[in-house]
Image (spheres, rainbow, N blue to C red):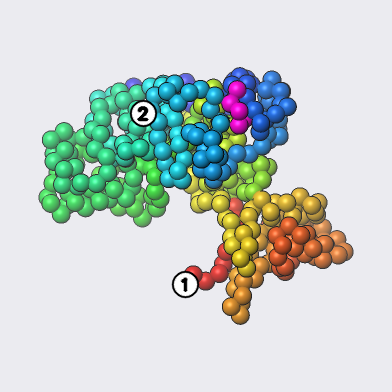
Amino acid sequence: MTEHHDALETRSPAAREADLFARLPAVLAAALKAPAYAERLAGIDPDAITDRKALTGLPILRKAELPALQKAVLPFGGFVSEAANSFGRLFTSPGPIFEPEGTAADAWGAARGLYAAGFRPGDIVLNTLSYHLTPGGFIMDSAARAVGCTVIPAGPGNTEQQMEVISAYRPSAYAGTPDFLKILIEAAETRGVDISSIKRAVVSGAAFPPSLQAWVRERGIDAYQLYATADVGVIAYETAAREGMVLNENLIVEIVRPGTGDPVPEGEVGEVVITNLDPHHPQIRLAVGDLTAILPGASACGRSNTRIRGWMGRADQTAKIKGMFVRPEQVAEIARRHAEIAKLRLVVGRANETDTMTLKAETYTEAAGLIDAVSSTLQQVTKLKGAVEILPLGALPNDGKVIADERPVG
């Protein structure tokens, strides 16, 4: 049995990059057949988009925009050229956001994540993600069967019946949220049910903090995390190296400064942007709204793809200040207008029963009159007055926050 799912995982980074960008022009050409992409990408030459620098010239499509865009043009907002009946399954997620599933055996690209977690042919997998309208259950189901596993389509809830199923089929693996795995373990301990057949797990859809990881490990289950979204599928997965998460193959992943499409330096926290290579359902620079950072170096597991730190929070930091919405894009616009600014953070507070805001700016130089100039721009862009504080380079935390709402809750 090989240690890796396929040879793609161990190819050189240069070979991977060359392959991804050699395939991208055809995907862009397919995207241009869809009316919404034809409008957004008007005038581009697909054959000229052959590296990351060229890709950053294309506009960002924010996941947060999709519900309104899809409502205006049902079902996919004009971003899919093929008819809905050309897909294998059709889903909806909260928003609502409508998502199609392709017809490939592992359409969501989850199989290599399960393989990295130790799932192998012959395993019986208890799949507790929902099969109802949302794609989670099918993401895990199709991946497990692509690996060669047998699947119990349990779905979430109904712990009594879950105990019966585990006792009867003796599954060797679990797929679902970490929270429900804890519920099942506690239910088994309370009822005296033997679930020791479950030796490994893949968890997704919720936070899996170190304390819960240790708790699960103490009960004999080796659990690994998948980072996935309902629109893209699996973006990254944990490996036996336990050092961050390895990016999936067949995706171009960028980490950009929230509110912009500009890539951040390695190690800096930013927003996840995905370009897939599926001409049937192309997604071009989709900002999924999650924060992460790239880890330097290669994984000790032998996989050569880039590693990320995993999910680090949400990039949607819109705040309502004095009745006005202020968005990360506006903060980015302020930085764009002043070449002296390296990095910004708008801190929202409250004093004397009134909202306050302070724009903290890391600057390359502190030019005369800079505070007054930036204050003026802040008011022009946000229509609100606020203080400006000049800071040296490196003074702001590396947490991806562009707007920090520090007002007391309640």
Quadrant housing residue 283: top right
For the point 45% across and 43% down, the residue is 96
Q: What secondary structure is the magenta-colored segment mainly?
A: helix
Q: Around disc 1, counting alpha carbons within 10 Å, would you say few (fewer than 14), some (14 to 19), or many (20 or more)? A: few
Q: Nearer the viewer, residue 354 or 274?
A: 354
Label 2 packing within 10 angstroms: few (<14), some (14-19), many (20+): many
- Disc assigned to residue 410: 1
Nearest to the observer: residue 191 or residue 376: 376
Left or right position of 320 against 410: right
Q: Which x, y percent locates residue 250?
A: 52, 26
- When the figure is inspected, residue 184 is found, relative to residue 132, above or below; the finding is below
Name the spot of residue 169 as percent of width and height, x first.
16, 33
- Let me know if residue 34 is in the magenta part: yes
The kind of residue on which mark 2 rests is Ala
Q: Residue at x 19, y 47 (%)?
A: 159
Residue type at mark 1: give it. Gly
